[in-house]
Image (tube, helix red, strand yellow):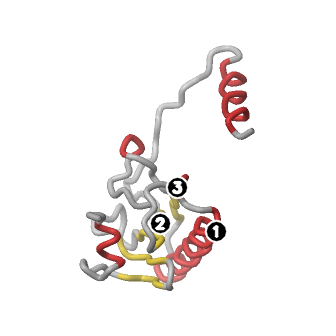
Amino acid sequence: MDCIFCKIVNKQIPSALVYEDPNFLAFLDISPANKGHALVIPKQHYETYTDLPDNVLKELAVVTKKVAEAINKSLNPDGLNIFMNNKQAAGQIVPHAHYHIVPRFKNDGIRFEWPHKKYDDGENKVYAEKIRNSMQ
């Protein structure tokens, strides 16, 4: 497999490691939005959030919280962004599921914005029904 994160897991590529246990790694992003921007990954390869088995997702959430708490304690940011991009259209560059933890500081210049679209009359109910029906 030619996954850069799998190569980091297998110690084929160095990283600035901040956390490791038998199933997960956290390391600093090589192109950080802010200094201290960390990535949290499962060691096993899963491409996206929806590919993660429920038990792995639960553990990943706990590890992500642990790393976020450490970033808060050590860097004292004004806030944090915690997110995961899924697939290329959503900004995922490395196809290995990973959370970003970005320490945020007042006036750091980072902007998370998207256009606020509107539903036509009743269209939101159609979308809600499609989504509900897909869960049955």
Q: Of residues 122 and 108, which is closer to you in this image?
A: 122
Distance from label 2 to label 3 (Cα)? Answer: 20 Å
Q: Amino acid at mark 3?
A: Asp
Quarter of the picture holding the N terminus: bottom left
Q: Earlier in the sequence, mark 2 or mark 3?
A: 3
Distance from label 2 to label 1 (Cα)? Answer: 21 Å
Q: Amino acid at mark 2?
A: Ile
Disc 2: which residue: 101
Distance from label 1 to label 3 (Cα)? Answer: 12 Å
Residue 119 lies, in percent from the top left, at 62, 21
Quarter of the picture holding the C terminus: top right
Residue 21 lies, in percent from the top left, at 50, 85
**Residue drawn at the location 33% of the way across and 65% of the way down:** 32
| Residue 31, quarter of picture | bottom left
For numbered disc 1, what is the local secondary structure? helix
Disc 3: which residue: 51
| Residue 8, quarter of picture | bottom left
Disc 1: which residue: 55
Q: Amino acid at mark 1?
A: Asn
Residue 49 lies, in percent from the top left, at 52, 55
Residue 13 is marked as: none
Q: Nearer the viewer, mark 2 or mark 3?
A: 3
